[in-house]
Image: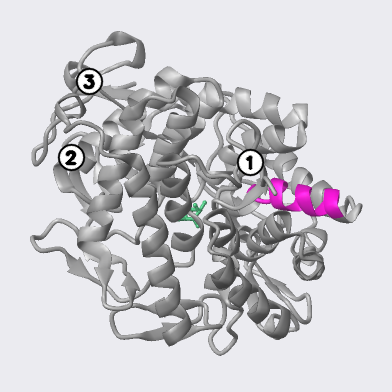
């Protein structure tokens, strides 16, 4: 039970309807924001920035996984000494959507000539799937370059042992791409259930069901083990399928598990996935939502008792506002985005973690994160309310102001200081996610089907390319 102290400030979800759109400390609330700028000029600016950053990547780090945009160096993401051109693969569909066709051709040429997966090193299955497999598949979807599909099928085959060697069907965290040796059975929900759309697209485009069947089986094991409150702890053992803890969260390392139940229904039309999503999100709304000072949050709770175990909220959790809206819960999605908007108003760039009772930062950096823009994009698609374009525009402006450096855009190690403290690296997802969300929501992209599309958790376009 929550304590009486909590009840004073922490009203239940149904207890209040007012107090939304909290006023920020630094800037004006949404209602007082300046009139909408010309979105056309913003979309042109996003395209220009993408091309500028791409040219720097080509000059300084081409073929390596990630550029270090301050020093002009590079680093690999999956395995030291084994570049797989992560930035290129993540950028393919973004370049295509933006009609940056000569840059796209440069990237495709590198992939055709260099990308191979006979690599004797353990690769993280989840990251390899959402970034590399998803990037190749979205590249194929946009360009119809069959080499991309061949590479995707080869990579899919190399990932499958993580599933087939597990006695429960829940995947191991790592697989050696050359030998198929698996490792790290202590895993979590996101790394268990973020495969169905990439594997589903691969099955559809190759006619081989092994991929989609493996992805669904992993979902089934964890869903069947749900608590009587319809909640899932986030830590699980791959070999037994048993829980390793009792804490439920919508943030990492659970987040995209929920996203992919909905997405699997949306992309593949699998009714089981929709019903599992409805059950689990019903549990989350009933037992994890909490309103503090008029703002909606999602607590970390014990999955079996419902007791709150933490009021810390990861920035990554902000994606959930968009997911709620996408799946028909627009009211809750709006409210949760309002909460994160209050954090954006307070800090400018969102810190990685906050305590939602005070909005104090619990983790001061920002890894050039896309989730707030992702949610704004999905809310905009669901409502066409310009409010979300304004919020995303502010997110974009703040990113330009704080993260733009000599050779591109970088992460921040402290957003609570003035000036902010910068790191020196640009994550691969930046090329696949926020650039694309900004571009698509500030203009009408000719190559994007605004009515019928699917973007993965990594922003990869697996449906909706208009050629
Ligand atoms: C991305 O790789 C994906 O969005 C993933 O689902 C979790 N978050 C990172 C970016 O923050």
Say left or right for 457 vs 16: right
Instruction: Give the residue number, with chain letter if any, for mark 1.
Output: 454
The reply to whether dot 3 and dot 1 touch (C-beta < 8 Å) is no
Q: Is label 3 or label 1 in front? A: 1
Instruction: Give the residue number, with chain letter if any, for mark 2.
Output: 345
Vertical order, 376 against 103 (above or below): above
- Local SS, label 1: strand
Q: Residue at x 62, y 67 (%)?
A: 184
The magenta segment? 193-205
Looking at the image, tell me whether mark 3 or mark 1 is earlier in sequence order: 3
Q: Is residue 119 visible?
A: no
Question: Chief secondary structure of the magenta span?
Answer: helix
The numbered mark at residue 378 is none
Question: Local crowd at mark 2 within 10 Å, few (<14), some, or many (≥20)?
Answer: many
Say left or right for 336 vs 171: left
The reply to whether dot 1 and dot 2 touch (C-beta < 8 Å) is no
Say left or right for 84 vs 41: right
Residue 199 magenta: yes
Residue 206, horizontal then vertical, whole percent: 88, 56
Instruction: Give the residue number, with chain letter if any, for mark 3.
Output: 294
Q: Residue at x 58, y 77 (%)?
A: 85
Q: Is residue 1 visible?
A: yes
Disc 1 Cβ-to-ligand 1 distance below 8 Å: no
Question: Local crowd at mark 3 within 10 Å, few (<14), some, or many (≥20)?
Answer: many
Q: CA distance from mark 3 to mark 1?
A: 33 Å
Looking at the picture, tell me which residue is in the foreground, 187 or 337.
337
Q: Residue at x 72, y 54 (%)?
A: 141
């Amino acid at each position: 039970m929550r304590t009486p102290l909590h009840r004073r400030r922490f009203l239940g979800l149904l207890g209040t309807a007012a107090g939304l759109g909290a006023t920020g400390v630094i800037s004006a609330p949404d209602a007082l924001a300046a009139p909408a700028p010309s979105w056309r000029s913003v979309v042109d600016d996003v395209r220009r920035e993408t091309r500028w950053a791409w040219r720097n990547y080509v000059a300084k780090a081409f073929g390596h996984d990630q550029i270090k945009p301050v020093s002009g160096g590079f680093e690999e993401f999956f395995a030291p000494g084994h570049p797989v051109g992560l930035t290129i693969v993540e950028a393919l569909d973004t370049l295509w959507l933006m009609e940056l066709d000569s840059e796209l051709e440069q990237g495709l040429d590198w992939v055709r000539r260099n990308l191979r997966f006979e690599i004797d090193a353990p690769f993280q299955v989840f990251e390899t799937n959402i970034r590399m497999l998803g990037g190749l598949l979205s590249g194929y979807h946009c360009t119809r370059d069959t080499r991309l599909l061949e590479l995707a099928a080869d990579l899919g085959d190399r990932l499958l042992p993580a599933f087939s060697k597990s006695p429960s069907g829940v995947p191991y965290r790592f697989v050696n791409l050359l030998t198929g040796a698996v490792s790290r059975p202590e895993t979590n929900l996101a790394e268990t259930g973020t495969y169905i759309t990439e594997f589903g697209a691969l099955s559809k485009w190759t006619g081989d069901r092994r991929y989609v069947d493996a992805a669904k089986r992993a979902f089934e094991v964890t869903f069947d083990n749900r608590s009587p409150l319809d909640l899932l702890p986030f830590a699980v053992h791959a070999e037994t399928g048993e829980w390793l803890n009792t804490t439920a969260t919508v943030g990492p390392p659970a987040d995209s598990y929920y996203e992919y139940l909905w997405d699997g229904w949306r992309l593949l039309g699998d009714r089981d996935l929709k019903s599992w999503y409805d059950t689990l999100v019903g549990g989350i709304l009933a037992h994890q939502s909490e309103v503090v000072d008029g703002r909606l949050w999602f607590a970390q709770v014990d999955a079996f008792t419902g007791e709150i175990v933490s009021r810390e909220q990861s920035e990554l959790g902000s994606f959930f506002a968009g997911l709620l809206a996408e799946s028909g819960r627009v009211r809750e999605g709006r409210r949760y985005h309002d909460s994160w908007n209050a954090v954006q108003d307070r800090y400018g760039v969102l810190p990685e973690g906050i305590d939602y009772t005070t909005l104090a930062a619990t983790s001061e950096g920002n890894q050039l994160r896309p989730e707030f823009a992702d949610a704004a994009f999905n809310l905009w698609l669901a409502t066409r309310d310009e409010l979300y374009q304004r919020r995303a525009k502010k997110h974009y402006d703040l990113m330009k102001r704080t993260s733009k450096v000599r050779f591109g855009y970088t992460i921040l190690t402290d957003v609570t200081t003035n000036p902010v403290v910068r790191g020196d690296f640009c994550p691969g997802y930046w090329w696949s996610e926020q650039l694309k969300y900004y571009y698509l929501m500030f203009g009408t992209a000719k190559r994007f089907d605004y009515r019928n599309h699917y973007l993965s958790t990594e922003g990869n376009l697996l449906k909706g390319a208009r050629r």
